[in-house]
Image: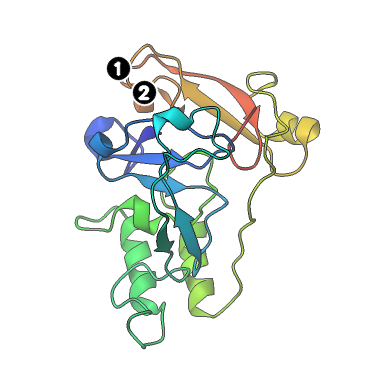
């Protein structure tokens, strides 16, 4: 889990919490954290997911553990359907031009624009501090046209990339070493609350060192 910003800049630019799906369980007391945006290539639109919470006693022994909550079914919206009315429950054709307009407003960072956790349409974006860009607008336009979902699905588990093994300043050495889609990710050096969080530049690491050197991860932003 990390803290990310509505626009590229210091914490005053609207931090929100997000957690990336990973291969191995991560145990934490999630309740005090409040609302958390969950991201990752494993999440697709118009899909049904079953979510369960495992107790601390299950750590390292998840198979057969009985300290598990009942399954809760969660659904994702249609691709590009970022603004009311939503279909379902509305029977109107969605998404539509209103959804495009909302993405344009967020791209311009207009006052009152929707939050990034809704308007960021690239589910597998390795760097969540990145601003909304033209690709997100194109994604909602494609959805209005009825084109197929354009993003890749889940990555292999465990990740085939070793954490901290391959330094990089661009994706090129990562793609050479680990294959297409591999990414170069920088993180805050710490110490501080943002230590280890992905960053674009030093403004994303206020109070937590600087935005350090990049290291390769897979296309899901994971390493092993």
Pointer 1 or 2: first along the chain = 2
Asked if disc 1 and disc 2 are in contact, CB closer than 8 Å, the reply is yes
Query: Which structural element holds mark 2?
Result: loop
How crowded is the residue under tag 2: few (<14 C-alpha within 10 Å), some, or many (20+)?
many
Q: Name the residue under label 1.
A: 207
Check the image and report above or below for 119 versus 217: below
Q: How many labels does the image show?
A: 2
For the C terminus, the image quarter is: top right
- Please identify the quarter of the rendering in which residue 88 is found: bottom left
Q: Which residue is drawn at 48% across and 60% down?
A: 49
Counting from the top left corner in percent of width and height, residue 108 is at 32, 55
Q: Can residue 107 be seen in this view?
A: no
Counting from the top left corner in percent of width and height, residue 190 is at 40, 13
Q: Farthest residue toward the top?
A: 191
Query: Which structural element holds mark 1?
Result: loop
Q: Residue 194 carries which label?
A: 2
Q: Is residue 161 left or right of residue 194?
A: right
Q: Can residue 42 be seen in this view?
A: yes
1 vs 2, front mark: 2
For the N terminus, the image quarter is: top left
Q: Which residue is drawn at 66% across and 46% down?
A: 155
């Amino acid at each position: 889990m990390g803290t990310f910003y509505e626009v590229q800049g210091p914490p005053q630019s609207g931090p929100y919490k997000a957690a990336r799906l990973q291969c191995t369980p991560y145990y934490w007391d999630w309740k005090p954290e409040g609302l958390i945006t969950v991201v990752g290539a494993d999440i697709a639109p118009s899909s049904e997911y079953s979510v369960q919470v495992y107790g601390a006693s299950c750590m390292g022994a998840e198979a057969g553990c009985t300290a598990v909550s009942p399954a809760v079914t969660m659904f994702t919206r249609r691709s590009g359907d970022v603004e009311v009315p939503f279909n379902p429950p509305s029977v109107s054709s969605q998404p539509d031009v209103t959804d495009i307009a909302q993405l344009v407003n967020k791209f311009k960072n207009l006052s009152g624009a929707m939050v990034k956790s809704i308007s960021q349409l690239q589910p597998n974006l390795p760097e969540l501090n990145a601003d909304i860009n033209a690709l997100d607008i194109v994604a909602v336009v494609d959805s209005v046209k009825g084109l197929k979902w354009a993003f890749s699905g889940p990555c292999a588990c465990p990740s085939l990339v070793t954490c901290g093994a391959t330094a990089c300043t661009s994706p090129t050495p990562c793609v050479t070493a680990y294959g297409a889609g591999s990414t170069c990710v920088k993180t805050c050096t710490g110490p501080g609350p943002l230590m280890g969080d992905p960053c674009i530049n030093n403004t994303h690491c206020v109070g937590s060192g600087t935005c350090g050197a990049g290291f390769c991860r897979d296309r899901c932003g994971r390493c092993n």
